[in-house]
Image (spheres, helix red, strand yellow):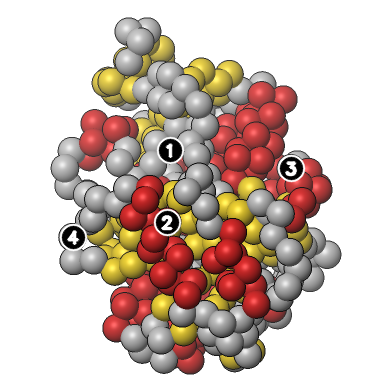
Amino acid sequence: MNSINSALIVGGGIAGLTAAISLARHGVSCDVVELRDQPAAGAGITLMGRAMDGLHELGVLNRCVEEGVARSPQEVWRYYDGAGRPLPGPPMPPGPSTGLPQGLFIYRPAFASILRDAAKAAGARIRTGVGIRAVRQSEVGVTAVLTDGLQGSYDLVVGADGVRSATRSLVFGDAVRPTYSGTTMLRWLVEDVPDVGPDGFYQESGTLVVLFRLLDGRMYLATGRNYVEKPRIGQDAARRMVTEILSAFSAPLPAALRQRMTDDSTILVNDYDWLLTPDPWYRGRTLLIGDASHATTAHLANGGAMAIEDGVVLGQEVAAGGGVEEVLARFMKRRFERTRLVVETSVEIGTMLQRGQPISEQNALRARALKALAAPY
């Protein structure tokens, strides 16, 4: 018999929506609240390895493949120098023999739409423009007070509200705070990019530019600058930075992108913050998942995968039965070390990149982590 039959999920991002799908498909009545009225801006996201298993279990993999670009891990981790000459990438572990795609590039808003549709189809109720204000816990349930003044009682509250989680602050106080990694990312979604060269990771003189093709001729670009403290970067400055960075690359594809920059181009500017909440991520009947508990930089391209796995595993453990403490303890046993590996490895690779350490050293560390992550979650 399930001890968790109702849940409030705070946050309508990847972790929150995958948790809603997984829990609802296992018979849990789910409410989802998202503080934003509109989806957050986004460019592209890379999903790899066991994330494909999770999307398959959630019933959304086929639609993701239709709206994204499927790749093998070897195609994901392709490296080139500034002139476009191939460089060695990380040795890849054998993929799981599931018959599923092992890598996927997808437009982030399209991915969010797929997850929202699936959550609603599973029976989850989603409200936007609403966040959480207070949590009152007891042995028999948890009452959540929302920012619109309404409140409800649930068996479980799931805080999936990101790196600056209000749920985490309510339940854990200031014990866990995000740390700036020293890198601020610049992301650009470019329309109608000509096929003049391969996408992948371009590195020159310690500068890394990530280029991935999406559907319909669109290209996702990500690069960054290092700072001691978080900078304030406006759009004019961001466009100049991306243009300057691309000027260091003579390969045809970066050169073509540089020519596409205009005064109307929109650059997404994001500081890379990270955090790792100590085990356990729950207090009583309130659990943190996704970036609320383990925000990472993108140097291992597994942040989205970890959020998906969190949601899937939570549904599995609730369905397996037992008391709330038992369910959440099993969840933590499956999730903590795996997510710690992603956070700590990603931060270390970012530090190596900042120091200008050879790409071979970065990829050796990356390969060890990817081998471990190839194991089932």
* Along the viewing direction, whichever of 353 and 160 lies nearer the viewer: 353
Dot 3: what SS? loop
Disc 1: which residue: 160
Question: Could you say which disc has been placed on residue 60 in the image?
Answer: 3
Task: Please state if 144 lies on the left or on the right of 249 as rendered.
Answer: left
Dot 2: what SS? helix
Task: Please state if 363 lies on the left or on the right of 284 as rendered.
Answer: right
Mark before the other along the chain sequence, 2 or 3: 3
Disc 2: which residue: 239
Q: CA distance from mark 3 to mark 4?
A: 40 Å
Mark before the other along the chain sequence, 4 or 1: 1
Q: CA distance from mark 2 to mark 1?
A: 32 Å
Mark before the other along the chain sequence, 4 or 2: 4
Residue, x 23% and y 66% (percent of image)? 227
Give the foreground label among 2 and 3.
Answer: 2
Q: CA distance from mark 4 to mark 1?
A: 27 Å
Marks 4/1 in contact by CB < 8 Å: the verdict is no
In the rendered image, residue 287, in percent from the top left (x then y), is placed at: 38, 38
Is residue 54 among the parts visible in the rendering?
no
In the rendered image, residue 332, in percent from the top left (x then y), is placed at: 42, 52
Kind of residue at badge 2: Arg
Kind of residue at badge 3: Val
> Few, some or many C-alpha atoms within 10 Å of disc 4 (few <14, some 14-19, many ≥20)?
few
Q: CA distance from mark 2 to mark 3?
A: 35 Å
> Few, some or many C-alpha atoms within 10 Å of disc 3 (few <14, some 14-19, many ≥20)?
some
> Few, some or many C-alpha atoms within 10 Å of disc 2 (few <14, some 14-19, many ≥20)?
many
Question: Could you say which disc has been placed on residue 21 in the image?
Answer: none
Marks 3/1 in contact by CB < 8 Å: the verdict is no
Give the foreground label among 3 and 4.
Answer: 4
* Along the viewing direction, whichever of 320 and 227 lies nearer the viewer: 227
Dot 1: what SS? loop
Disc 4: which residue: 229
